[in-house]
Image (cartoon, helix red, strand yellow):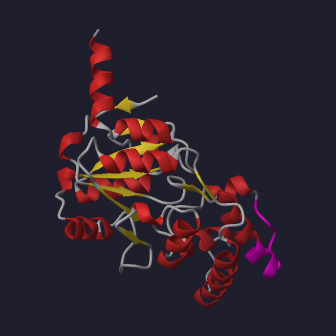
């Protein structure tokens, strides 16, 4: 069900920025396997997949820090992070898939009822592996730009990445939508002055209750409808009858 809290002026939208993990792709299992491979390597107890899922969203360094219980030694933390990254790069597409319907949703959203929009990705995941995953899943051509957690000095929810994408696309904040599965994405949108759509099918739906987006959807198909002018206009007409 599409829940609209603040209607987005869809006819004005020129740029849509997507989160990656939990929004476009279901990468939880491969990330969890990589984390547990790192834990085994250092003689630590493995963690349940659902626990690791709650650690995803703030970038690989924070993921590993949380999995290790916030270790005090920075050198050990960096060594563990490097081990995880090497393992994950080799196994990043073992189980990772685009969410069902995402490809079709991106096509519809990008067309924008005949007025093409620019689509981009802003993730806290390292940029190289992010681009490799999108290419491997056949989604790379949908996006004009992909930035990761190591593309800038700061990560989401800092607005630097979103501001850079807007500048490159020639879009103003009120002409831009951020789409994501967590409160981090909503905060990014708020910090940059953007509209925001939250998706509940991702890794962190509970955080969307703490930081509500402008629109909330449950499936990629609903995401496409929520960002398509003709669909939302027709939905509004049905509600008025």
In-front residue for pair 74/233: 233
28 sits left or right of 13 in the view: right
x, y percentage for residue 63?
Answer: 59, 69
In-front residue for pair 107/156: 107
- Image point (23%, 70%), residue name: 168
In the image, residue 110 above or below residue 214? below
In the image, residue 216 above or below residue 192? above
Q: Which segment did they paint magenta?
A: 37-47
- Image point (60%, 86%), residue name: 78
x, y percentage for residue 142?
Answer: 41, 60
162 sits left or right of 94 in the view: left
Q: Is residue 130 visible?
A: yes
x, y percentage for residue 7?
Answer: 25, 34
Q: Is residue 217 visible?
A: no
In the image, residue 51 above or below residue 145? above
Q: Which residue reaches farthest front?
A: 114
x, y percentage for residue 32?
Answer: 70, 64
Q: In which quarter of the image is the C terminus?
A: top left
In the image, residue 196 above or below residue 234? below
- Image point (26%, 71%), residue name: 164
Residue 164 lies in magenta, yes or no?
no
């Amino acid at each position: 069900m599409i829940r609209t809290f603040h209607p987005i002026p869809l006819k004005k939208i020129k740029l849509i920025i997507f989160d990656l993990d939990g929004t476009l792709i279901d990468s939880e299992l491969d990330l969890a396997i990589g984390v547990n491979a790192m834990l085994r390597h250092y003689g630590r107890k493995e963690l349940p997949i659902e626990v690791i899922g709650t650690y995803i969203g703030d970038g690989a360094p924070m993921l590993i820090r949380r999995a290790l219980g916030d270790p005090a030694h920075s050198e050990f933390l960096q060594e563990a992070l490097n081990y995880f990254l090497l393992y994950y790069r080799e196994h990043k597409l073992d189980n990772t898939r685009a969410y069902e319907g995402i490809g079709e949703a991106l096509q519809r959203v990008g067309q924008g009822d005949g007025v093409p929009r620019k689509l981009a990705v802003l993730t806290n995941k390292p940029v190289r592996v992010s681009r490799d995953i999108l290419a491997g899943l056949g989604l790379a051509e949908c996006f004009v730009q992909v930035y990761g957690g190591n593309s800038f000095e700061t990560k989401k929810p800092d607005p630097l990445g979103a501001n850079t994408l807007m500048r490159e696309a020639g879009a103003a904040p009120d002409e831009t939508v951020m789409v994501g599965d967590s409160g981090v994405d909503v905060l990014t949108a708020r910090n940059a002055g953007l509209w925001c759509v939250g998706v509940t099918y991702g890794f962190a739906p509970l955080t969307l209750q703490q930081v509500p987006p402008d629109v909330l959807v449950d499936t990629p198909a609903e995401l496409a409808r929520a960002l398509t002018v003709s669909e939302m206009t027709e939905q509004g007409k049905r509600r008025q009858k």
